[in-house]
Image (cartoon, coloured by chain):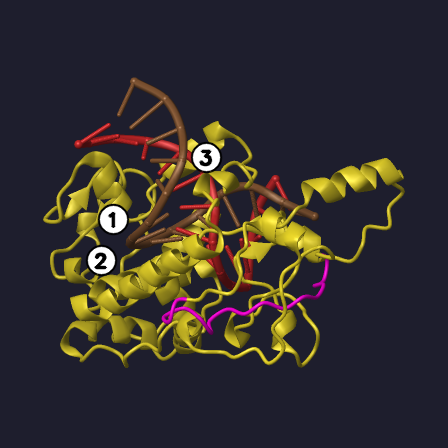
Chain colours: A yellow, B brown, C red
DNA sequence: ACGCCTTTGAAGTGA
DNA sequence: TCACTTCAAAGGCGT
């Protein structure tokens, strides 16, 4: 069911007819035709992509908000225990980074022991003290299990010990810094949603993936540079942090299930990677993917 | 309530 | 060194 939906969305975007049945060879499908669709009445996303190559690159992306200056009027120090627990240091003193972060104390939402020192207004997550951006946590720090922790206190019948144990488990998690594509997605998602009236992230991400590839090297370089700074900043804020810290925190239904899903035809890129096909490949039988050469630049 | 989907890239893991 | 795995974001959907 889901795959049909995705195929459907993707076909609307790429003008590929969905592979119906298992034996049908997609190369026999009708040629690419552009035009409005039910999900994209204006055809904006399709047309935008189709004409992308002949269009000048979209407007220069704004610098990541992370790197915009935001001055905190009331900087304070992080209590020693918090600093130690989070691997947090005093405000960065390098000329490049000072001012991006400043320290302030305060409790935030379900994180009563978390000191919020990240102050950038556009990277707000969760609720802080209204009107005071200084009470907003660094976006990389979230409760360990996201959605659930944002819910009100669980009033179910639990012993104090159980509640305490649960609290212990739900220590905030320091998230990975965003890579170049993630930064690009974050910035462009709203535009794509507006253009295509799509809401499903999976479909939107497919569009964004293709648009990412359609970007010029210079355009992409900006995001790579931002991502590099993000990592640099992240390293300075959390010196002891490792991506390994978050390994296994996402519960997967089963390894077998996951492998099955990843072996599913997800994209031409994955397909080519899995089967060792090169960019010139126009058809990948195992994955049911057609990669017409005239579309390759967009993939 | 929470995992899956989907994308790319960075980083971890194991051979 | 290489291939493979996990996780970053997002929100609808399915279990």
The answer to which of marks 2 and 3 sits earlier in the sequence is: 3
State if disc 3 and disc 1 touch (CB < 8 Å): no
The quadrant in which the C terminus of chain A is found is bottom left
Residue A156, numbered label: none
Q: Position of residue A70 (x, y in %)?
A: 49, 78
Q: Residues within 10 Å of mark 1 (few under 14, many from 20)?
A: many
Task: Work out whether residue A171 can be spotted.
Answer: yes
* Mark 3, residue position: A258
User: In terms of image quadrants, where is residue A53?
Assistant: bottom left
Q: Identify the subunit bearing mark 3.
A: A
Please state the chain letter of the residue tagged with numbered disc 1 in the rendered image: A
Residue at the location (63% across, 60% down)? A78
From which residue to which does the magenta span run?
A94-110
What secondary structure is found at the residue carrying circle 1? Answer: helix
- Badge 2: how crowded within 10 Å, few (<14), some, or many (20+)? many
Secondary structure at badge 2 equals: loop
Q: Nearer the viewer, residue A56 or A61?
A: A61
Residue depicted at x 72% and y 41%? A168
Q: Nearer the viewer, residue A215 or A286?
A: A215
Residue positioned 21% across, 38% down in the render: A285
- Magenta highlight on residue A108: yes
Left or right for A221, reference A264: left
Location of residue C8 with respect to A215 vertically, above or below: above
Residue indicated by mark 1: A268
In the image: residue A20, left or right of residue A110: left
Q: Name the residue carrying label 2.
A: A299
């Amino acid at each position: 069911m889901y795959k049909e939906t995705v195929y459907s969305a993707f076909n609307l975007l790429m003008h590929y007819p969905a592979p119906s049945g298992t034996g049908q060879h997609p190369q026999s499908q009708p040629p690419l035709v552009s035009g409005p669709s039910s999900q994209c009445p204006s055809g904006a996303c399709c047309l935008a992509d189709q004409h992308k190559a002949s269009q000048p690159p979209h407007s220069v992306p704004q610098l990541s908000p992370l790197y915009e200056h935001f001055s905190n009027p009331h900087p304070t120090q992080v209590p020693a225990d918090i600093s130690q627990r989070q691997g947090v240091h005093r405000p960065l003193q390098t000329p490049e980074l000072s001012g991006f972060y400043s320290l302030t104390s305060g409790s935030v939402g379900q994180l009563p022991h978390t000191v919020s020192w990240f102050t950038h207004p556009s990277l707000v997550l969760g609720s802080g003290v209204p009107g005071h951006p200084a009470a907003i946590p660094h976006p990389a720090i979230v409760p360990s299990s996201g959605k659930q922790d944002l819910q009100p206190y669980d009033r179910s019948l639990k012993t104090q010990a159980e509640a305490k144990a649960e609290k212990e488990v739900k220590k905030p998690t320091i998230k990975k810094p965003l890579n170049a594509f993630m930064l690009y997605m974050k910035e462009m998602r709203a535009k794509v949603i507006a253009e295509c009236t799509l809401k499903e992230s999976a479909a939107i991400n497919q569009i964004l993936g293709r648009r990412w590839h359609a970007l010029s090297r210079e355009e992409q370089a900006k995001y790579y540079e931002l991502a590099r700074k993000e990592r640099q900043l992240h390293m300075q804020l959390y010196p002891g942090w490792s991506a390994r810290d978050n390994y296994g925190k996402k519960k997967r239904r089963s390894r077998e299930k996951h492998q099955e899903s990843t072996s599913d035809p997800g994209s031409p890129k994955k397909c080519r990677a899995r089967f060792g096909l090169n960019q010139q490949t126009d058809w990948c039988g195992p994955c049911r993917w057609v990669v017409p050469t005239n579309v390759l630049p967009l993939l």
